[in-house]
Amino acid sequence: ECKTKFSAEISNNKYYCYSVFLLGNEKHSIQVASQQEDGEPTLQDMAVLIEQVTGVPVPFQKLIYKGRSLKELEQPLSALGVKNGCKVMLIGKRNSPEEEAELKKLKDLEKSVEQIANKLEEVNKEFTSIQKGFLAKDLQAEALKQLDKRIKGTAEQFMKILEQIDAINLPENFSDCKLKKKGLVKRVQVFLAQCDTIEGNIGQEMDKLQSKNLALAE
């Protein structure tokens, strides 16, 4: 278990937190800024950065300010009373090197999920533009065919990722990894459901277009 003290300063809606970690001779300094442009940094912003620096996962951090536990991650630090020069203490437990290795695998898979999700978003945007009539009618059939192929490929990539996640066997005491794995599985399942919906919509649009073409041919 480690205990860490933070001192903080505010400048232009950013907290510059100069930290001294009470872990033997180990010392670090961190700067916490909002992830939202022109926004105030939140407790979540601070906690994520603390995890990166200390290795103490966000769910297992206990942040204490003036004897009070800070729990509202979505709240701006200012709303929690954390001001210039304030000191915040962290109490938490680091993961073992073995758990960190498994956690890295899951984080790498998480990055892959984000990349595939971007492809899903691109297909959805292109399909929406076709639905709105932004593409010439004589080009729609081929475009829909290509989108159908791409959405099927995207779903297949998500399925492969899901198989890789399922293949990671974790000991009972790897609680942080188990939490990350569970959350990642849920996200992939949501994206797969979106793939099914979009694929179904593309199929319906292809059927409608085919019916129109047959009617015109008659």
Image (cartoon, helix red, strand yellow):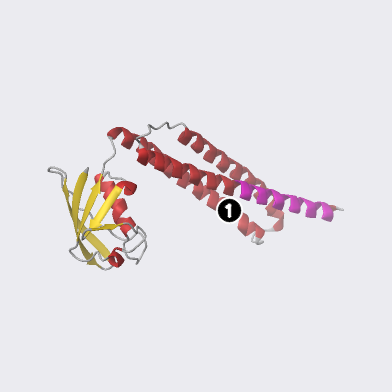
**Whole-percent x, y for residue 105 in the image:** 38, 36
Res. 64 image quadrant: bottom left
Magenta highlight range: 196-216
Q: Is residue 107 magenta?
A: no
Q: Is residue 202 magenta?
A: yes
Pointer 1 residue: 124
Q: Count the marks: how many?
A: 1
Q: From this viewpoint, is residue 128 visible?
A: yes
**Whole-percent x, y for residue 160 in the image:** 52, 36
| Residue closer to the observer: 180 or 135 | 180
Whether residue 99 sits left or right of residue 127 in the image: it is left
Q: From this viewpoint, is residue 108 visible?
A: no
Whether residue 199 sits left or right of residue 59 in the image: it is right
- Residue at the image position 42 percent from the left and 31 percent from the top: 169
Q: Quadrant of the N terminus?
A: top left
What kind of residue is marked 1? Asn
Whether residue 142 sits left or right of residue 60 in the image: it is right
* Residue at far bottom of view: 12
Q: Is residue 194 above or below residue 78?
A: above
* Residue at far front of view: 67
